[in-house]
Structure formats: C-alpha cells, structure tokens
Amino acid sequence: MDAEILKDLARHQMWADAEHWKALRANEALMGDEQIRTRLKHMTMTSEMLQKLAHGEAPATIKDRDSMEEIETAMLKANESLAQAVATLDLDRICHLPRGPKGPFEAPTGVLLLQVMMHGQHHRAQNASRMHELGAKPPMTDFVLWYALGKP
C-alpha cells in the first residue's frame, strides 16, 4: 500500500469535507435536510468504526450523534485521526474484520483506511447530488482540483 497516496487522499478528504460543510452551513435548507444529515452521520460512524478496527480495537463504542453540530465536530475529529493513522500505523498489518460478504475476513490496515476514504467520497457525491436537488450548488471537491490548488 502506497503510504504517500493514502496521506494525500486523507488530506484531500479533510479539505473536501470542510468545503461541503461550508456549503451546508451557508444554506438552511441543506442543514435541515434529513437525507444529508443521515448520510453525514453514517459517514462519520463508519469512519470511526473502520479506524477502530485498523487500530486493532473493537468498534462497539461508536457514539451516535443527532445534531449537525455534533456530526460536524465528530467528522472533523475522525478526519484528523484518519490522517494520523495513515501516517503512523503499519499499513501492511493484517486486521480481523467481524463481517464481510462471506463472513469474517482479514485485510491489511491500509485497505481499511483506503475504504474510509472511498466510502466518504461516495457519500460526498450523494450529498452533492442532493444539494442540486434542493437548488443549491455543491462545491467542487475533485481530487485533481485539490491538487491543482496546491493541496490546501
């Protein structure tokens, strides 16, 4: 697993999520939308769960959040810990996952951390589509744009 690309992807996720939160906070309809809130909550909880597994911990202590403020704070913290995990964990260490398509399985830590980022990308795109549906213009958060901007 390429640690440098994972570090860039983690930094991109921090930036992209922050851009989405700016757009959300600027529009009351977006902040009050149940579909967006539910996805953000799911994104955050999944990130926390996979990161716990990547650290060799049981994910049983994931905290549920309801308010957008709580979700935003938790997402920021999860993204910061993701960047830290990519920089410090052994990306080739094998992690045991309790369930998968064929039951429990094993995967390298780097694969779990990459999944956190790909999962976030997927749901950011869903939220961007929802922003369009609600008449708002979502921010451009493509990886290549982030790169062109000098990796802010």
Image (cartoon, grey):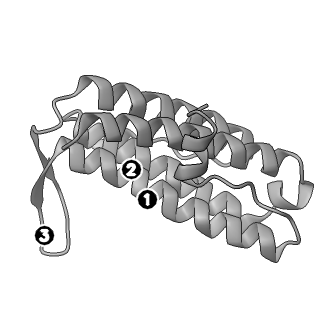
Depth check, mark 3 against mark 2: the one in front is 2
Q: Is residue 109 left or right of residue 29?
A: left
Residue corresponding to mark 1:
119
For disc 3, the neighbor class at 10 Å (few under 14, some 14 to 19, many from 20) is few
Of the 4 image quadrants, the one containing the N terminus is top left
- Residue 143 in the image: above or below residue 147: below
Residue 116 - label: 2
Residue 58 seen by the camera: no
Residue 125 seen by the camera: yes
The x, y position of residue 68, in whole percent, is 73, 46
Q: Disc 2 residue type?
A: Val
The x, y position of residue 133, in whole percent, is 80, 77
Q: Are marks 1 and 2 in contact (CB under 8 Å)?
A: yes
The x, y position of residue 52, in whole percent, is 30, 38
Quick one: 67 or 142, which is closer to the camera?
142
Distance between the Cα atoms at labels 3 and 2? 20 Å
Q: Secondary structure at mark 3?
A: loop
Residue corresponding to mark 3:
103
- Residue 110 in the image: above or below residue 118: above
Q: Secondary structure at mark 1?
A: helix
